Amino acid sequence: MEPLAGIGAGFAQAILGIADLLKGTSAPGLVALVLFGATGGMMLAAQILFWRACSYPKDLTYVLKREQRPITRALVTGLHIPLPKRNYGPVSARQMRVWTAFCEEFLYTSDASGRAASPIDPALALSREALGLRLGIWRIVPGTLVGIGLVLTFLGLIAALRGAGVSITASGTDPDMVKKALSDLLTIASAKFIMSLAGLTGSIVFGVFLKSWVGSRPSEPAKLQLGEIGTKV
């Protein structure tokens, strides 16, 4: 049991050492600043990735709307997608394959119009999942921000309680010293909750950002205007 006790004591000391880094009232402010900065940085990165992921569907929509005529074999063959000098995202190659596979299933009428008809529901063939327009790992960011804020807050409280215990022990029976130690404990402990507040605020802001992005990219392909193919075929 002694080796296990030694391992446990060493692990506890390591945690206390980390907690000691959060002593005082300045550390929580710096942590909050880092959390806010990280939230803003991740929002910017996510926006860029989302924008690139939607670049090919947007260009395809633009080209189809520009034609202003029914879908025919000649139209599908003559579509020039991707557009030149466009910075498409890594998911665009998959979207191109999905679009190509969808077009390969077209059936064309034998009349003069030669209009296409799709045996596959565009809402299924060109769904958000098929096009790779998903949130992916960004879904876990809000919960992670809250978790980080709570963990750092508890570490800060551990450091505050530990420091208060040392101060109270050193004060002996002097009531003024004990009162000052308890006052310092409350002051420092209240500052630690800044980290929880920062994590929670970052979580709310990032969550609203994700919701707004999902709301602006409807799941129905018809609303993405890619589904207009289904109304023209």
Image (tube, rainbow, N blue to C red):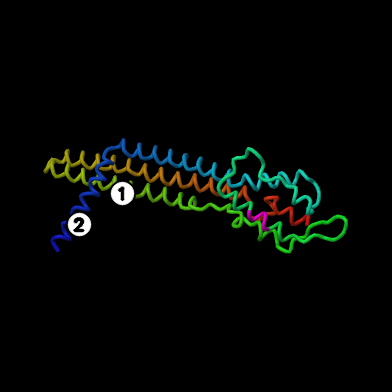
Residue tagged by mark 2?
Answer: 8
Q: Residues within 10 Å of mark 2 (few under 14, many from 20)?
A: few
From what the image shows, is residue 60 above or below residue 6?
A: above
Q: Position of residue 70 (x, y in %)?
A: 80, 52
Q: Nearer the viewer, residue 167 or 7?
A: 7
Residue tagged by mark 1?
Answer: 154
Q: Position of residue 217 (x, y in %)?
A: 62, 49
Q: Position of residue 80 (x, y in %)?
A: 71, 45
> Left or right: 100 with respect to 21?
right
> Left or right: 6 with respect to 226?
left
- The residue that appears at 24% across and 43% down in the rendered structure is 20
State the quadrant of the C terminus: bottom right
- The residue that appears at 48% across and 52% down in the rendered structure is 137
Looking at the rendered structure, the kind of residue marked 1 is Phe
Q: How many marks?
A: 2
| Residue 12: mark in rendering | none
* Residue farthest right in this picture: 112
- The residue that appears at 77% across and 61% down in the rendered structure is 107
Q: Distance between the Cα atoms at labels 1 and 2? A: 19 Å
Q: Which secondary structure lies at badge 2? A: helix
Q: Residues within 10 Å of mark 1 (few under 14, many from 20)?
A: some
**Image-quadrant location for residue 190:** top left
Tell whether position 16 is magenta.
no
Q: Which secondary structure lies at badge 1? A: helix
Looking at the rendered structure, the kind of residue marked 2 is Gly
Prevailing secondary structure class for the magenta stretch in the rendered image: helix
Q: Position of residue 17 (x, y in %)?
A: 23, 45
Q: Nearer the viewer, residue 178 or 140?
A: 140
State the quadrant of the N terminus: bottom left
Q: In the rendered structure, which disc, 1 or 2, sits on the residue that comes first in sequence?
A: 2
> Left or right: 179 with respect to 105?
left
Looking at the rendering, the stretch of residues picked out in magenta corresponds to: 97-101
